[in-house]
Amino acid sequence: MEKRIFKIAVTGGPCAGKTTLLDKIRREATSISNVKVFFAKEAATLIKHSGINFMDAGGDSTFQELIIEQQVLAEDRAFRVANRYSESHPDTKVIIICDRGIMDGEAYFDSPSDFAKILLRYSLTKEIVYARYDAVICLRSAAIGAREFYTTMDGTPRDESIDEAAMLDKKVCAAWKGHEKYTEIDNSFKFYEKLDKAISKIFAVASVEIPKEICKRYVVETPNLFELVGKRNSSLFVDQTFFLKESDANSVSAIKIRRSGDNPNYFLSNQRWDFVKNPISNEMVEAAVVDTVFCIGEKEFINYLKNVDSSVKILEKMTYSFYIGASVHCEIDLFLCNQNRAYLKAYFDADTKENRELIENSFEIVREVTYNKSYCEREIARTEGEVLNN
C-alpha cells in the first residue's frame, strides 16, 4: 500500500527559528489540499509547564527519562489520531511534525554512551529511535552563522549564552546526523528563505508540492462591519502597535498588544523589505517579502518599550481575518486614525482572473499597493492615517 502517514522530527539549537517555522506551517497547511498535519508538542516544554525542572527531577538523567516518556507518549498519541484520520480520509496524506525528537536528549550529556544507557531502560537504541522518524529537519542556531540575530528575547524560554547555544547546536546536530533522511538547514539564507526551505523539505518527504502563496495588498474603502463579521471562518483581533527605533532602513520592527477577547497577548513583529521582480512588469521593485511575528511575554514587552520611537504615534486598529470564496484568505485592517480607508491583504495560490475578480467584487479598491512601501504600517502611523487618502 502507498504510504500515507509520515512522521518528521524538527529540531535544532537555540534561536534557530523552530517555533516560527512551526507556527508558519500551522497557518499554511490549511491551504494545501489533500494534506492533514498533526503536531507532537515539545516534551521538555510540557514538563516545565507542569512546574518540574531538572533539579526537581533529581538531575539531568532523571529529567531526560521524563522527557523520553513524554516524547514517546506525545508521538504515539499523534500517530493514533493520524492513523484514525487516514482510515477515514484515504485520499489524504497525513504528516506528523514532532517538535524535537528523542535523540535531542543526547546533546545534554558529556558522552553519547551515557544517553545510550538511558535509552536502553526503555528498550531503545539510536537505530530504533531513528526508525521512528521518516525524516529529520535540523535548523542551525543563529549562534552559528548569524550571531548578530541571536537573542533570548523572542518569547521562547532560553538562557543560553551565544557560545553555549553554538555548542548545544553542534551536539544536537551530531545526535541526528546518522539518520538516513537527515537535512540540515543553516543560516546562509535570509530568514524567510530558511523557513521556506525547511517547509519545502518537510512536505517533500510526503511528495507534497507546496503551492507558492501570493500576497497582494490594497487600500480599500472601509467595508460594512456587519458584512465582515458574517464572512466564512472570520476572526477579530484588536491591536495597539508601538514602533521601535530603526537602525536598518529596510526593516520595520514593532511591538504589539493584541486582544482577542479579554486577555492581552504581546508580540514582536518585523516586516522586511527587499527588492523582488514584479511578475507583470519584470522590473525590480521594493516589496514586503516577509512578515515575522514572535509571541513575547509581558516583561519582554515592557523591556522593548525602552526602544520605542516616540516620533511615531501608536497605531490602533481592528483586524478581521476571513475567506472570500474557497481560495482567497483576507486580512483587513480598520484604523482608528482613518475610518474611511482600510488596508487589505489578500492571500491566494494562483493569480487567476477568477481570484482577481473575487477580490474586486468584494471590496471597493482605491489602489493596489503591493509594491509600495509608502503604505506600510509605520507610514500609516507616522502620517496618522493620512497616507491612505493619497
Image (tube, grey):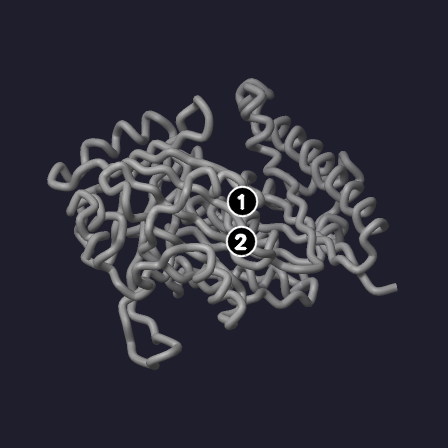
State the SS at label 1. Answer: loop
338 in relation to 93, above or below: above
Residue 181, percent from left and from top: 66, 63
Left or right placement of residue 244 versus residue 5 in this view: left
- As drawn, the label of residue 182 is none
Mark 1–mark 2 Cα distance, whole angstroms, equals 7 Å
Left or right placement of residue 192 versus residue 75 in this view: left
The residue drawn where x is 78% and y is 58% is 4
Amino acid tagged 1: Lys
Asked if marks 1 and 2 touch (Cβ < 8 Å), the reply is yes
Amino acid tagged 2: Ile
The residue drawn where x is 60% and y is 40% is 105
How dense is the environment of label 1, judged by Cα within 10 Å: few (below 14), some, or many (20 and up)?
Answer: some
Residue 212, percent from left and from top: 52, 67
State the SS at label 2. Answer: strand
User: Within the image, what quadrant is residue 385 found in?
Assistant: top left
Asked if residue 330 can be seen in this view, the reply is yes
Asked if residue 173 can be seen in this view, the reply is no
The residue drawn where x is 51% and y is 72% is 353
226 in relation to 298, above or below: below
Q: Nearer the viewer, residue 302 or 32?
A: 32
Report which residue position mark 2 lands on: 324
The residue drawn where x is 50% and y is 61% is 358
Q: Nearer the viewer, residue 287 or 341?
A: 341
- Mark with earlier residue (1, 2): 1
Question: Which quadrant holds the N terminus?
Answer: bottom right
Residue 201, percent from left and from top: 58, 63
Q: Nearer the viewer, residue 343 or 14?
A: 343
- As drawn, the label of residue 231 is 1
In the picture as drawn, the residue positioned furthest to the right comes out as 1
Question: Which quadrant holds the C terminus?
Answer: bottom left
Residue 350, percent from left and from top: 53, 69
